Image: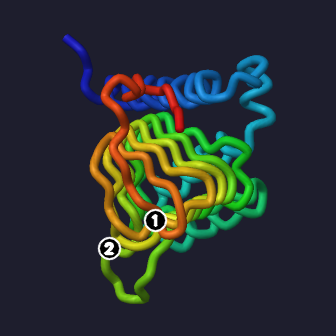
Amino acid sequence: MVNSQTYRPRHRVDAFFRTIREDIYAVRKGDPAALSKISIVLNYSGLHAVWGYRIARALWVRNRKLLGRSVSQFTRFLTGIEIHPGAQIGRRLFIDHGMGVVIGETAEVGDDVLIYHGVTLGGVSTKKVKRHPTIGDRVMIGAGAKLLGPIEIGSDSSVGANSVVTKSAPPNSILTGVPARARSRAPQLAHEPGDWII
């Protein structure tokens, strides 16, 4: 019979290391320039930002909001990437190059998302409401793109570099332009999980 008191901490430790392995795998899959696991751990600011976010988020949900926000700001100082601890981030997020990425408090990001540098998931309201984007699974967001307001971007979509997105888009969309317009991705081009194209 398994002792539940010893099982829970061990389960948490296993989950912690599994998450770290997934994060490293996401970098290796998303960046052909990644040389080795040790290089990824030491040199990828996007990975450091995600790990800093996870610490800040753990504090935030335990009502240690000041400490969580402080960890978030320290991570921003180190990496140039700001992820509010109130945001909800899925598994295997890869922020490539990283500098200048901002993810707001009420943003939601799905699994296997790729974000390039200079991306903003920003709000357009000063009220205490849902004011940041919701991003589906396996979405690629190009460098410099701005996604603003409580919009929803469907899974398996791509957002072009420097696009300004203010309207929701269904799954399998390609969004480009200022303001961005969505068009449907051809079914034969729909990418596999972890395959980011534009």
Question: What element does badge 1 sit on?
Answer: strand
Q: Which mark is residue 130?
A: 2
Q: Nearer the viewer, mark 2 or mark 1?
A: 1
Name which of mark 2 and mark 1 comes first in the sequence.
2
Residue at point 57% right, 47% down?
115
Q: Nearer the viewer, residue 195 or 1?
A: 195
User: Disc 2 residue type?
Assistant: Lys
Distance in Å between CA atoms under marks 2 and 1: 17 Å
Total residue callouts: 2
Instruction: Answer yes or no: is residue 49 visible.
Output: yes
Q: Nearer the viewer, residue 49 or 179?
A: 179
Mark 1, residue position: 165
User: Disc 1 residue type?
Assistant: Val
For this orientation, the residue located farthest to the left is 1
Q: Which mark is residue 120?
A: none
Which quadrant holds the N terminus? top left
Residue at point 53% right, 68% down?
178
